[in-house]
Image: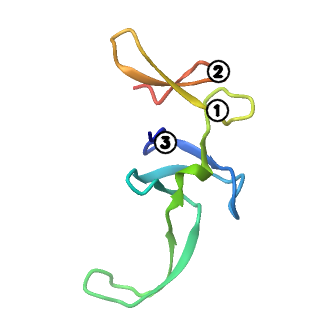
Amino acid sequence: MNRIKKGDKVRVISGKNSTKEGIVLQVFPKKNLAIVEGINVAKRHTKPSANQDKGGILDKELPIHLSKLALVAPKSPRGVSKISYSKDKEGKKVRIAKKTNSVIGGK
């Protein structure tokens, strides 16, 4: 089950980018991958084409496995928390940080 969603603030817990934080831009649930802003950046050499006016060396964010990401919970002293689910007053399913019992991404 995928507990990380687009727009969540996450921290990398292992690998060369460990302890870095960023916002999830895109999630690929079938492949268990996510693209995080500013994390796992690689250089790509591109030619100018009809779609791009300029060529050159561009920075591109590559996907990172979901098992290497931990959700940064609001109001948590250390930041990282596990997630549980429950229903709110209207009967909607919401995500809750286990350490602080606060709702994550409530709209």
Secondary structure type for disc 2: loop
Q: How is the image coloured?
A: rainbow
Q: Amino acid at mark 3?
A: Ile
Write down the residue under mark 1. 81
* Residue 1 placement, left or right of 70: left
Secondary structure type for disc 1: loop
Secondary structure type for disc 3: loop
Which residue in the rendered view is the most extreme toward the right?
Answer: 78
Q: Specify few, some or many for label 1: CA neighbours under 10 Å numbering under 14, 14-19, or 20 or more.
A: some
Q: Residue at x 46, y 43 (%)?
A: 7
What is the C-alpha distance between the residues marked 2 and 3?
A: 18 Å
Along the polypeptide, which appears first: circle 2 or circle 3?
Answer: 3
Q: Residue at x 59, y 49 (%)?
A: 69
Q: Amino acid at mark 1?
A: Ser
Write down the residue under mark 3. 4
Along the polypeptide, which appears first: circle 3 or circle 1?
Answer: 3
* Circle on res. 100: 2
Q: Residue at x 68, y 61 (%)?
A: 17
Which residue in the rendered view is the most extreme toward the left?
Answer: 50
In the rendered view, would you say 10 is above or below 81?
A: below
How far from the left and from the top, in percent, is residue 40? 58, 65
In the rendered view, would you say 106 is above or below 88?
A: below
How far from the left and from the top, in percent, is residue 23? 53, 49
Q: Specify few, some or many for label 3: CA neighbours under 10 Å numbering under 14, 14-19, or 20 or more.
A: some
What is the C-alpha distance between the residues marked 2 and 1?
A: 8 Å
* Circle on res. 29: none
Does the residue at mark 2 contact the one at mark 1 (Cβ under 8 Å)? yes
Q: Which part of the image, by quadrant, shows the N terminus? A: top left
Quarter of image, res 75: top right
How far from the left and from the top, in percent, is residue 54? 39, 85
In the rendered view, would you say 69 is above or below 107?
A: below
